[in-house]
Amino acid sequence: MLPDKKGHFEEFGGRYVPETLIYALDELEKEYNKAKRDKKFAQEFDYYLREYAGRPTPLYLAKNLSRYLGVNKIYLKREDLLHTGAHKINNTLGQIILAKRMKKTRVIAETGAGQHGVATATVAAMFGLSCDVYMGEEDIERQKLNVFRMKLLGSRVIPVKSGTKTLKDAMTEALRDWVTNVRHTHYIIGTVAGPHPYPEMVRDFQSVIGKEARKQILKSEKRLPDYLVACVGGGSNSMGLFYPFFNDKRVKFIGVEAAGLGLSSGKHSASLVAGSTGVLHGSKSSLLEDKFGQVLNAHSIAAGLDYPGVGPEHAYYKKIKRATYVAITDKEALEGFKLLSETEGIIPALEPAHAIAYLTKLKNKISKNSIIILCLSGRGDKDTYAVAERLKL
Ligand SMILES: *Cc1c(COP(=O)(O)O)cnc(C)c1O
């Protein structure tokens, strides 16, 4: 089973961090390994997932969408129905319980659009830990509602003025804070990226998505699905869905990245489809960089996909061809957004709208009796203003 003891998925992953962080990462790894073997941890995590976050989420057969696309059966894993409106809460709950066990009194997080920030602020409020969220100045301006939500939940939002003033810089600042305050602070990373043990740990916390889906599909269809489809930003909702099916070799994985204004425009976030191997935020993976190795700015209409890197396990899945990665443009994602809203009465977040949009291409390549599970990672309320500006209704 990967990763190996040093957090490598073959050449990907690992720990590319300053010496000063090694202590914190070792401590976290030790605590996480202990928690993995501890029934009490599993029980507590499970309790909060059920009673607080609202699990299990339905695996909903989207009959209208299936009929419209001429696909046998499309099931939606309804992470959009969770508390705070997306899958992010699965991970923040797991990590805050760990923080408590390590007797930390403060948590920090990075956030782009503010969704991971809100999910962290939420669990910090509930567990009574203080919380500081690093957010680029640019994003603070664009995501006022989420900034207000975090403040309402009792968190501080720290503006990041360096670099492009977006997610990448926020994560850099959060890592810097952690180095200085590691004794009482835990850093809650929001996706399957970062140095070991984060990619493995966040994957495990998000795997509840795939474990439930696997049980649910076996119950309703008496067989496994043919395809799993999910959007990929940092890669946590997709990895959460994929991982429990890893050994089911006939189940195909499709990760959908953001092609933004088009891959040839250079304004996109397709770090797997159009990236190369490099190091960012403490691990080796696929990322967007120029010919000098400088990390490029990402672009996507979906703030949650707007990141120039991706979790190392995805780079590994791509390499061994366990998963296929494709990219969908802003414009196509808007069509996906409309399509699900109109056929099923479900307004998706712009991130999974990329996955929905990909179905309109996938349908032409697959056999008529295929069963597809799509991870509906979040709901679209947060995006309605941005979409209203683009769609004339
Ligand atoms: C943050 C976010 C994503 C992207 O993050 P992953 O780690 O790739 O899952 C996707 N969908 C929603 C709704 C999000 O909030």
Image: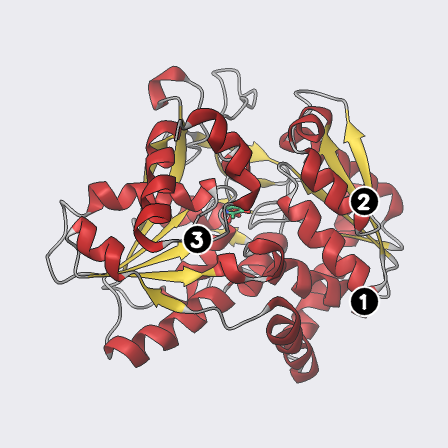
Amino acid at pointer 1: Lys
Q: Is residue 215 left or right of residue 87?
A: left
Residue, disc 1: 100
Q: If the image is split into quadrants, where does the N terminus sit?
A: bottom left
Of pointers 1 and 3, the one earlier in the residue sequence = 1
Residue drawn where x is 55% and y is 22% of the image: 297
- Against 245, residue 158 (above or below) is above
Q: Which percent across, then down, holds residue 329? A: 36, 29
Residue, disc 2: 151
Residue, disc 3: 238
In the image, the residue with mark 3 has its CB under 8 Å from the nearest atom of ligand 1 = yes
Amino acid at pointer 3: Ser
Q: Is residue 59 left or right of residue 50?
A: left
Residue drawn where x is 19% and y is 50% of the image: 68
Q: Is residue 84 left or right of residue 345?
A: right
Residue drawn where x is 44% and y is 72% of the image: 212
For the residue pair 60 and 246, the one nearer the viewer reads as: 60
